[in-house]
Image: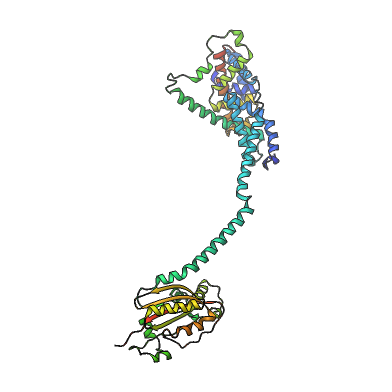
């Protein structure tokens, strides 16, 4: 870490290799898109390299890096949302549609129960349900249930108190449960 | 305990972080409430689905791409630093040479422009040339601003100065009015005290000899004076013709000044001959004012 702070590129490369998978999974679960997650993670590592001298070591490096990934993910989601909103009412797409519902609804040509049970399909549905959450709730769920962060760490990443983390987590889980019930039937 | 209260705590209940005093009532409620039990089971399954999500592998080029961007950033940062600091060994000498060049050009321009500026400032009327004195170099700065060795209105000088009549003039018809301020001064620059100030240096440059001559006719006299100067190797800098007088400015070897004076003596009368020129090294600037003698009626 001290080498990284001195601008040692090779040392930073080691950090990238060590943390890229965890960071990519956070970004992917937040963004729901492989390409967007790739861009976010790249930007996050570049930001980390630029700001690594400001990393005081009070938190773990992974927590600090996760906060960067989270912030960039949220910013990117806002941009995408603004773009979708703009395109939704453009001449090319005159019919407004509920994007969340579109994500939740099964594709046309109703899949059979067997197909629905396919792991990949379930995974996609779960991801879609996570994607239907507001970013604040999604972030807590991703950090806690996917990445296994402690409440303290989540508080550090999101800069919110522990009580807020707990309440958001409860709401996020409830929302995902309802969403999964809706898209999968009985759980 | 109400169902809504229980459901709010189910998330924490699953994680086992409900305070002990709340855990027992929840347990009791779940035993009797089928809906809350079902809700708990669904929540556990939902969490399991989320936790069982497979990890996604990042693209294989991720590290490479990130590090390429990092390296290009560090190189561009270094490039900026190099542009600012690295070429100092080239930049500084160039800048030093440029500063010296500008300074030399300024001095050169100042020297070449000075005589022209002096002449251009001269009043168009009746003037007489006077050389600056050494004392003038030591005048106050305000006095230094005043033109030295420049033209001065003849009437004012006449009031201030004592009349002197050259012996040669006695041979000629006397003018009706006595001529004042007819004198020659010389200012040997070599004798001037060395001074580092700019004004003092410029003052020395201005030093020279000023002559005023009475002649019968300006034009031929002027021609003869020019010839005399040329013969002695002098360089005529400027000729100025006014209504009844003419001004010749020239540079001459200091050693030949006395020869020049001898050559000029037959041409006209010096207004002031109470002087003795001591030759020195180098050239000296001579300003000869030729005045047409007024003829008695």
Report the colour scheme: rainbow
Residue at the spot x=61%, y=57% of the render?
Answer: B93
Question: What x and y, as percent, mark residue B239?
Answer: 42, 73
Q: Is residue B263 above or below residue A181?
A: below
Residue at the spot x=53%, y=76% of the render? B283
Q: Quadrant of residue B31?
A: top right
Q: Residue at x 70, y 37 (%)?
A: A10
Position of residue B75 in the picture relative to residue B139 (left or right) = right
Q: Is residue B160 visible?
A: yes
- Quarter of the N terminus of chain A within the rendering: top right
Is B233 or B214 nearer to us in this picture? Answer: B233
User: Is B28 drawn above or below residue A168 in the view shown?
Assistant: above
| Vertical arrangement, residue B201 with respect to residue A25, above or below | below
Query: In x, y percent, where is residue B168?
Result: 42, 90
Tally of numbered tags: 0
Near-viewer residue (A18 or B91): B91
Question: Is A43 or A116 nearer to us in this picture?
Answer: A43
Q: Is residue B199 left or right of residue A18?
A: left
- Quadrant position of the C terminus of chain A in the picture: top right
Residue in the picture at 56% in, 60% down = B99
- Quarter location, residue B152: bottom left
Location of residue B3 in the rendering, given as x and y in whole percent from the top left corner: 55, 18
The furthest residue to the left: B297
Residue A8 appears at what percent x and percent y?
Answer: 69, 40
- Tell me the quarter of the picture where residue B264 sits: bottom left
Q: Is residue A141 visible?
A: no
User: Which sits in the foreground, B197 or B67?
Assistant: B197
């Amino acid at each position: 870490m001290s080498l990284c702070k001195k601008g040692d590129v090779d040392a930073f490369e080691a950090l990238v290799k060590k943390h890229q998978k965890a960071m990519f999974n956070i970004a992917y679960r937040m963004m729901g898109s492989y390409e967007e997650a790739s861009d976010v993670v790249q930007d996050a590592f570049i930001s980390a390299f630029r700001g690594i001298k400001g990393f005081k070591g009070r938190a773990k490096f992974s927590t600090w890096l996760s906060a960067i990934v989270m912030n960039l993910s949220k910013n990117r989601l806002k941009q995408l949302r603004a773009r979708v909103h703009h395109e939704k009412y453009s001449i090319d797409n005159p019919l407004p549609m509920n994007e969340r519902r579109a994500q939740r609804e099964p594709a046309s040509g109703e899949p059979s129960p067997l197909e629905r049970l396919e792991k990949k399909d379930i995974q996609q549905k779960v991801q879609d349900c996570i994607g239907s959450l507001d970013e604040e709730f999604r972030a807590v769920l991703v950090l806690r249930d996917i990445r296994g962060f402690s409440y303290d760490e989540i508080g550090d990443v999101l800069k919110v108190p522990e009580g807020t983390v707990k309440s958001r987590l409860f709401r996020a889980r409830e929302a995902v449960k309802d969403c999964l019930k809706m898209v999968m039937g009985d759980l | 305990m109400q169902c809504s209260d229980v459901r709010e705590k189910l998330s924490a209940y699953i994680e086992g972080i409900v305070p002990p005093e709340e855990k027992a009532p929840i347990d009791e409620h779940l035993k009797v409430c089928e809906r809350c039990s079902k809700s708990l089971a669904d929540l556990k399954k939902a969490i399991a689905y989320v936790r069982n999500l497979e990890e996604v592998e990042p693209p294989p080029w991720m590290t490479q791409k990130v590090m390429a961007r990092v390296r290009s950033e560090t190189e561009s940062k270094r490039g900026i630093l190099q542009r600012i600091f690295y070429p100092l060994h080239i930049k500084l000498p160039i800048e030093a040479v440029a500063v010296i060049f500008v300074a030399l050009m300024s001095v050169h321009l100042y020297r070449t422009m000075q005589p022209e500026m002096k002449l251009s400032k001269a009043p168009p009327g009746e003037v007489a040339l006077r050389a600056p004195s050494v004392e003038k170099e030591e005048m106050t700065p305000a006095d230094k601003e005043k033109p030295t060795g420049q033209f001065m209105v003849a009437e004012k000088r006449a009031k201030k100065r004592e009349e002197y009549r050259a012996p040669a003039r006695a041979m000629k018809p006397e003018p009706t009015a006595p001529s004042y301020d007819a004198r020659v001064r010389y200012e040997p620059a070599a004798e001037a005290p060395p001074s580092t100030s700019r004004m003092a240096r410029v003052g020395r440059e201005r030093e020279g000899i000023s002559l005023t001559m009475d002649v019968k006719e300006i034009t031929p006299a002027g021609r003869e004076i020019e010839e005399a100067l040329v013969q002695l190797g002098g360089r005529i800098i400027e000729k100025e013709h006014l209504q009844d007088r003419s001004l010749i400015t020239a540079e001459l070897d200091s050693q030949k000044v006395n020869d020049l004076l001898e050559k000029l003596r037959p041409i006209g009368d010096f207004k002031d001959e109470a002087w003795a020129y001591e030759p020195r090294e180098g050239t000296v600037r001579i300003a000869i004012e030729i005045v047409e003698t007024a003829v008695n009626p």
